[in-house]
Image (cartoon, helix red, strand yellow):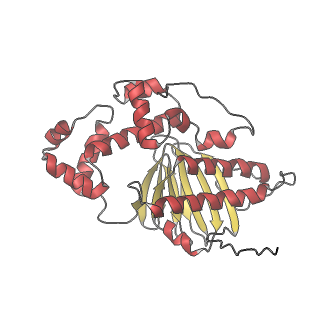
Amino acid sequence: MIYESIPLAKDLSVEKIYTIHYFEYCNDFSYPGEQHDFWEFQCVDKGTARIQADEEVHVLTHGQIIFHRPNEFHNLSATGNHAPNIVVVSFACNSPCMSFFEKQILTLSDTERTLIGKIIAEARRCIASPLDDPYLHKMELRKDSPVGSQQLLVLYLEQLLIHMLRRYTTQVPHCVRNIGDPSFESSACRRITRYLEDHICESLSLEAICHDNLIGRSQLQKIFREEYGCGVIDFFSHMKINFARQLIRENDMNFTQISEFLGYSSIHYFSRQFKKLCGMTPTEYALSIKAISERPQNSEKDIKNGADD
């Protein structure tokens, strides 16, 4: 019997990797900016960061990632509130599908966060240069790196990009934001979202939001569905869980304290809401990019600072 191979297309190919960094910045850090002829992404693993992309300025929170296309000017600075941890990866990729990532701020899934953790971990195995030098322009390879380490580095990066492409192009969720879209967030939405931020630690009802903002119930729901594709209470629930994610990453409070701080009736209700909106328990989320990247091979560290019911 004669067997014939089949040609396999490679829709996305990373040709070169220029930098891989994990920075733990001070809360007053500021990088003046640069532009280069290859791709770069910046991912916030903790805290918040102010990032400029050409003429647009954005504040990213933990779990968000921004892509800079080739020759796009970009800089980064801390917001002064919380010292941010930032992952920066720059690479060459000329695949046409990369056009999807232009002018996008995306939110990482658990799988994508794990893949970035693997990229950082593998970089430590095959790159001799420190990963926390923001002014490093050329990485040096280790002479004693494990077999296949450099290849895995590229494969993990390609897998990350393909996973994000599939997830966001199959069904574009509400967490995708088109940078520079002038219709994003009306003045009414901005006013109400600021109100929700000011009351993030409370349990708000739809009636209370309408009363305090002098707006009718149907009008409020209409503008939020037009802007965000969900009702105001769903939006507030996502906002609270996003804040909970930040508190988990800062590691100053356990899950019970976070639940009480954000006004949840019980740790069990908080855990159920967290899993419903994030697709994972608080414990699972606490296994962050930093934790994943620093975890010894063939070992797991149990996190036992709360309930996951």
Q: Position of residue 91 (x, y in %)?
A: 65, 65
- Taking 142 as reference, is 290 left or right? left
* Residue appearing at x 73%, y 50% in the figure: 122
| Residue 128 in view, yes or no | no
265 and 61: which is toward the camera: 265
In the orientation shown, which residue stands out farthest toward the right? 144
Q: Is residue 199 left or right of residue 9?
A: left
Residue found at x 53% / y 31% = 251
- The picture places residue 224, in percent across and down from the top left corner, at 25, 52
The spot of residue 102 in percent (x, y) is: 49, 68
x and y, in percent, of residue 200 in the image: 32, 36
For the N terminus, the quadrant is: bottom right
Could one spot residue 206 in this view of the protein? yes
Q: How many marks?
A: 0
Q: Is residue 233 above or below residue 70?
A: above
Residue furthest toward the front? 1
Name the foreground residue: 149 vs 183.
149
Q: Quadrant of residue 304?
A: top right
Quadrant of the image occupied by residue 10: bottom right
In the rendered view, tell whether residue 170 sits above or below residue 225: below
